[in-house]
Amino acid sequence: MTDAAVDVLVVGDANPDLLLTGDTVPRFGQAEQLLDSAELLLGGSAAIVACGLARLGVRTALAAVVGADQFGSVVLDRLRDGGVDVSAVEIDAERPTGLSVVLSEPGDRAILTLPGTIPVLTAEAVRATLARLRPRHVHVASYFLLPGLAAELPALLDEISATGATISLDTNWDPAERWAGLHEVLPRVDVFLPNREEALAIATAVDGRAHDDLDEAAAALSALGCRVVVKAGADGGVAFEGGRRSGEAPGLVLDVVDTTGAGDSFDAGYLAAVLEGVEEEADRLRWAAVAGSLSVRGTGGTGAQATRDELAEARV
C-alpha cells in the first residue's frame, strides 16, 4: 500500500492519567495521606502506543473518542504535541472524557478508571478512518474497554485485511476477568502483544483448560495463526509462532522511575521494527524491549519514550 496517508492507525482509548506517587495505598476512615507527587499525564494504551510510534518516526494516527471538556482538551493537546494525527479522534458532547487514577509504586501500580467516552468508539468510525487514511498497519488496543467495537471486531478485521493492511492487538487487562470473545479475533490478527498474565488468562479462556506455564500458553495461542509477542517487563520479551518459541530479547537494566505505559512503549518499538522491515525476530524483540525499558526513565506513559537515535544507541 504505497499510497498510505499514515503508516499506522492505532484504535482504542485516550484519556488523562492522574499519576500519584508516595503513600498511595488508600486507608479509609477519613485518614488523610500525604503524597510525594501528583501529575496529570496522557494515558490510555492506544494513545501511549501512538505517541511511542510517532516519537520513533512512524507516521501515526489515533482513532478514539474524548469528551468536550477540559480533560478532552488535555488529551488532544498532548497527542498533537507528540506528533500524532488526531483527525480521527471524535469529540462526544454528551459524555465525560475517560480518566485513570494511577497509584504508582516503584515495582507495581494500581489503576482506577472512569470509562467515560472510552467505550463509545464504533466500528463505523474506524471504517471511515480506514478509507480516508489508508494505513499500512492497524493496531487495536484495550479490547475489553471497548465492548461495542469488540462485538464487531472480527468482521472489521476481515475488512482491514482485505485492504492489505496488517493487524496487531493488545487487549490489555480485562476488568471483568472473563477474557471472552478472543477465539474469533486472534486468528484474524497478525501480531498479538499480551503480557505474561494476560497470555495465561487468555489461553485458558480460549482453549478451556488452565494454563500456568507461559511457553505452553503462548504456543497454544500462536497455533491459532497469530504471532504472539509476550512482554516480560525487565526481562524483555519472547515471541512464539506456529506453536513454538521463535525469538527472545532481554530488557535493559535501568533505575525505574515509573512503569506506567512501559508495555505500550514495547508495542510501539516492536511495530516500528516490523514497519521498518526488520526480519529477524530477535531484532524486532530487541527494538521492543529497549523501547519498553527506556520508557521507565520518567513519569507517565509518554514522558520518557525512546527516540529513534536512543533506540539505535541502546541496541548496540
Image: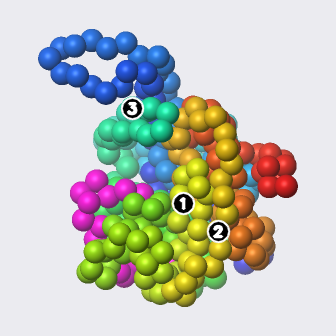
Disc 1 residue crowd, few under 14, some 14–19, many 20+, Cα 10 Å: many
Figure quadrant of residue 111: top left
Q: Is 183 or 87 nearer to us in this picture? A: 183
Tell me which residue sits at (35%, 69%) in the image.
212
The disc placed on residue 103 is 3
Residue 64 at least partly seen: no
Residue 275: percent from left, percent from top: 73, 68
Can residue 101 be found in the magenta stretch?
no
First in sequence: mark 1 or mark 3?
3
* Residue 250 shows in the view: yes
177 within the magenta span? yes
SS class, disc 3: strand
Q: Secondary structure at mark 1?
A: strand
Above or below for 306 versus 147: above
Look at mark 2 in the image and give the residue it sits on.
248
Q: Residue at x 59, y 72 (%)?
A: 239
Q: Residue furthest left?
A: 29
Tell me what residue is drawn at x 40 percent, y 71 percent. Answer: 213
Q: Is residue 149 above or below residue 95?
A: below
How far across and how far down the image is residue 145, in percent? 34, 56
Residue 194 coordinates in the image, percent (x, y) = 47, 64
Q: CA distance from mark 1 to mark 3?
A: 21 Å
Q: Is residue 8 above or below residue 36?
A: below
Give the left or right position of residue 18, taking residue 273 as reference: left
Badge 3 amino acid: Leu
Residue at (45%, 25%) from the top-left corner? 21
What's the magenta region?
172-190
What residue is shown with label 1? 231
Using residue 258 as the reference point, say whether residue 145 is left or right of it.
left
